[in-house]
């Protein structure tokens, strides 16, 4: 872990170029990963990094510094094939300041793939400080910033790509995703990221659900999550909801003869969580990832 700590500590200085003028929190923005294309034959996965502005008015996007983690036993990031979708006249090229794979960090036991941790940090600088960068409005919806390319090493395994942020990856680093808003040539402000959309392969999630005829939704959820079975359960079934660091945040029980239950998530912060579903006889033992969106 010493090498990992050293590597991640060094990237702390990278955020200074974004907010050297003004670090006051400004507008809110949402961030997510989404699958752009999966070539099953070539075993290549293309993932878009997208942002969304949901407030009224407009936002001019300045520089950005992205950090994320992934299961490097299942995925291998090809940094040479990553492409920025931002206009070259306003932004510099995307730069990977750090990229490591196969890190053994299981002693921290925070992310479920921390025994084969992949880490990447890339930035995009605003080169046109006079006029600013692209303008985002609520009507634009999700806008693609970058497309990442991964080689899929194990097609039958679930893959996870997780944003670096407080409460999820802070045991690995104290620096997280940072994004800037252009206000004027001498005024940049830090954006408040209100939603982080991580990515979990739908193929594996669907396989888990089908194996025991479990349906979980809505996912992403805002107020509640409903867990239902195709048939009535024979034994008392327990659902434990855990956050990214393994702490239990919710629980529920489905009694014999019943088929469903609902978990209230309206009081939870927007993040990724895991539902551990098991019955008293251990005939059902499933783990399904869900997203709470705020």
Image (cartoon, rainbow, N blue to C red):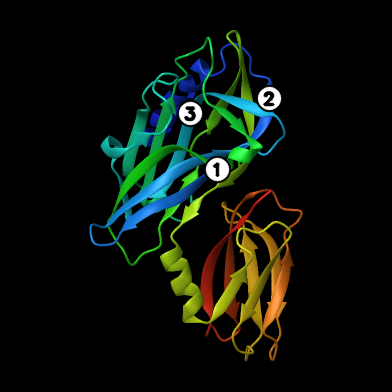
Q: Is residue 243 positioned above or below 171 on the image?
A: below
Please report the residue visible at 68 percent of the width from the left and 24 percent of the height from the top: 25
The residue carrying pointer 2 sits among few (fewer than 14), some (14 to 19) or many (20 or more) residues within 10 Å by Cα, namely some
Residue 142: which numbered mark, if any?
Answer: 1
Q: Disc 3 vs disc 1: Cβ atoms closer than 8 Å?
A: no
Residue holding disc 3? 65
Q: Residue furthest front?
A: 139
Q: Earlier in the sequence, mark 3 or mark 2?
A: 2
Q: Which one is in front, 146 or 227? A: 146
Residue holding disc 2? 25
Q: Earlier in the sequence, mark 3 or mark 1?
A: 3
* Residue 220 visible, this angle: yes
* Residue 170 visible, this angle: no
The residue carrying pointer 3 sits among few (fewer than 14), some (14 to 19) or many (20 or more) residues within 10 Å by Cα, namely many
Instruction: Tell me the quadrant of the picture where the N terminus can be found.
Output: top left
Real-space CA distance between mark 3 and mark 2, rounded to the nearest whole angstrom = 16 Å
Q: Disc 1 vs disc 2: Cβ atoms closer than 8 Å?
A: no
Q: Which one is in front, 210 or 6? A: 210
Q: Earlier in the sequence, mark 1 or mark 2?
A: 2
The residue carrying pointer 1 sits among few (fewer than 14), some (14 to 19) or many (20 or more) residues within 10 Å by Cα, namely some
Q: Is residue 120 positioned above or below 160 on the image?
A: above
Classify residue 110 as left or right of residue 146: right
**What secondary structure is found at the residue carrying circle 3?**
strand
Image quarter for residue 21?
A: top right
Numbered-mark total: 3
Q: Is residue 42 positioned above or below 166 on the image?
A: below
Percent coordinates x, y for residue 258 in the rendering = 70, 87
């Amino acid at each position: 872990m010493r090498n990992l700590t050293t590597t991640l500590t060094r990237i702390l200085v990278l955020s200074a170029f974004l907010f050297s003028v003004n670090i006051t929190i400004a507008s809110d923005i949402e961030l997510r990963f989404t699958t752009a294309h999966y070539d099953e034959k070539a075993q290549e996965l293309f993932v878009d990094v997208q942002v969304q502005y949901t407030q009224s008015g407009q936002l001019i996007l300045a520089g950005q510094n992205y950090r994320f983690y992934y299961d490097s036993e299942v995925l291998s990031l090809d940094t040479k094939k990553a492409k920025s979708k931002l206009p070259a006249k306003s932004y510099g090229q995307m730069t990977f300041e750090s990229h490591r794979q196969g890190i053994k960090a299981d002693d921290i036991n925070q992310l479920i793939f921390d025994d084969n941790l992949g880490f990447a940090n890339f930035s995009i600088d605003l080169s046109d400080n006079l006029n600013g960068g692209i303008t985002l409005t609520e009507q634009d919806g999700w806008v693609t910033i970058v497309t990442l390319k991964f080689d899929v090493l194990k097609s039958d395994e679930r893959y996870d790509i997780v944003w670096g942020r407080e409460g999820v990856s802070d045991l690995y680093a104290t620096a997280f995703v940072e994004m800037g808003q252009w206000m004027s040539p001498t005024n940049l402000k830090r954006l408040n990221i209100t939603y982080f959309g991580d990515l979990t392969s739908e193929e594996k999630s669907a396989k888990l659900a089908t194996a025991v005829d479990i349906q979980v939704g809505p996912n992403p959820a805002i107020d509640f999550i409903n867990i239902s079975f195709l048939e009535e359960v024979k034994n008392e079934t327990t659902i434990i909801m855990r956050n990214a660091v393994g702490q239990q945040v919710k629980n529920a029980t489905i009694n014999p003869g019943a088929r469903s239950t609902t978990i209230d998530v309206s009081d939870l912060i927007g993040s990724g969580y895991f539902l551990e579903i098991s019955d008293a006889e251990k005939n059902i033992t499933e783990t399904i990832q869900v997203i709470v969106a705020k």
